Image (cartoon, rainbow, N blue to C red):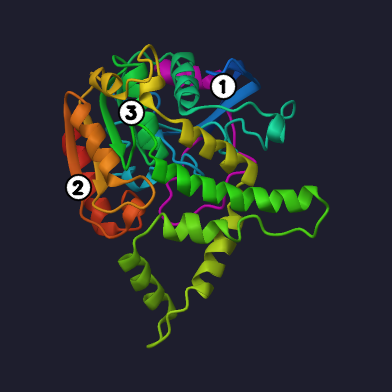
Amino acid sequence: MSDLAEALLTVSAVQPLRHPPFQLGWVDAPHYSVSLGDFPLDSGGVIEDFSISFAVHGDSRDDRLPIALALCAIGSTHHRMDFMIGTGQALDPSRLRILAIDAIGNGLTTSPSTSRSQPGYLFPQFTIGDMVRSQASLVKRLGIEKLDLVAGASMGGMQSLAWGVMYPEAMRRIVALTPMAKTTPWARLVNLLARSTLERGMCHELGGEPATDPWYDWVPLMLALSMRTPSQFDAEILDFCRSPGKSDPCPWLDLRRSWWRSQGFESIDWIYQSRAYDLHDVGKLGSFNGDTVAALNSVRAPTFIAAPSLDLYNPADAAVWASRHIPECHYMEINSVYGHMAASGLDQSASRALNDAVARFIA
């Protein structure tokens, strides 16, 4: 039996109580949760009784297979990178053992909505650096000495870059899709507006006013405006309406609201993750004292960065800029009109191109 398989026997194999309904394109895999005790944060605070959730793809007993991490985006789970996981995909479980890890605050790993001793706003604010350190603690707990790959999209890509700065010798390759090395004012503005919609709904509830749907105004902003592009959204609405001359986005938005509510994500968790998103700057990690360029210069692993020409959440310019300061970096412009969601399974053509490019990169 391999070291990883033996380590997994010592931790909890679980089916997460709040796992969202299974969706088309997701890849099922065994779920686990590891208790890391009281987890110290960059701020000096502590998350009490911290547990980290993850899924394992591939044969954990086969020590011949290298190990990869797949990291999730804001408001998502260990399924975020499933569009790249599977037979013939870039992350092929016949060639890799893949740990798909849930980030702090996503409702599966310990979060403001799940903590018993620090619920809600009693929960300490965490950072993307804290997410990465929790993942590194998990890797150590499982007895993993070297990673073949660290990969993620959106906030997962931001974590991947942070891994390269914080643990430059830990991995052979890095894949960061639609990332930022430092969160731009534009992305912070989007998060600010999104948080305000959620906080307004929470204030109504705390003030004893009639309950409102906290996601009602959030969905148009975070599942449409910032995630797509005008041309793609127009085409999607016309296709959705399936009637000449009709282009009302409201029925589409109502359907997306219903879908998002079914995921069971808590608004307080998204608020906390978005604050971590805003605080992100790899230059503030380690001893770089805010020098983002020096931090990127320190990345030792060959890195693959990809972004579309237009991204209304994480601006493409930020991805290009990061790629220019990493010593050995390959940049790919994703040929897609899907904006931030170009690095997902929504655009099948872009997904195939990304899978092919990443497979060549990590070969």
- Badge number at residue 313: none
Q: Vertical placement of 221 versus 9: above or below?
A: below
Q: Position of residue 73 (x, y in %)?
A: 44, 41
Indicate the position of residue 24 as horizontal and vertical percent values. 44, 57
Name which of mark 1 and mark 3 comes first in the sequence.
1
Q: Secondary structure at mark 3?
A: helix
Q: Residues within 10 Å of mark 2 (few under 14, many from 20)?
A: some
Q: Is residue 132 visible?
A: yes
Closer to the N terminus: mark 2 or mark 1? 1
Looking at the image, which is closer to me, 44 or 235? 44
Residue annotated with mark 1: 11
State the SS at label 2.
strand
Q: Which residue is mark 2?
A: 333
Left or right relative to 39: residue 354: left
Q: How many marks?
A: 3
Q: Which residue does the numbered mark 3 point to in the structure image?
A: 161
Give the quarter of the figure containing the N terminus: top left
Please tell me which residue is depicted at 30% across the width and 58% down the height of the picture: 347
150 lies left or right of 134: left
Between 193 and 17, the residue placed more toward the observer is 193
Residue sitting nearer the eye, 357 or 331 = 331
Residue lying at 79% horizontally and 60% vertically, measured from the top left = 210
Please provide the residue range marked out in magenta.
2-30
309 part of magenta stretch: no
Percent across and percent down for residue 273 are 53, 37
Q: Is residue 295 above or below residue 260?
A: above
Q: Amino acid at mark 2?
A: Glu
Observer-side mark, 2 or 1, equals 2
Main SS of the magenta part reads loop
Which is nearer the N-term, disc 2 or disc 3?
3
* Marks 2 and 1 in Cβ contact (< 8 Å): no
Determine the secondary structure under disc 1.
loop
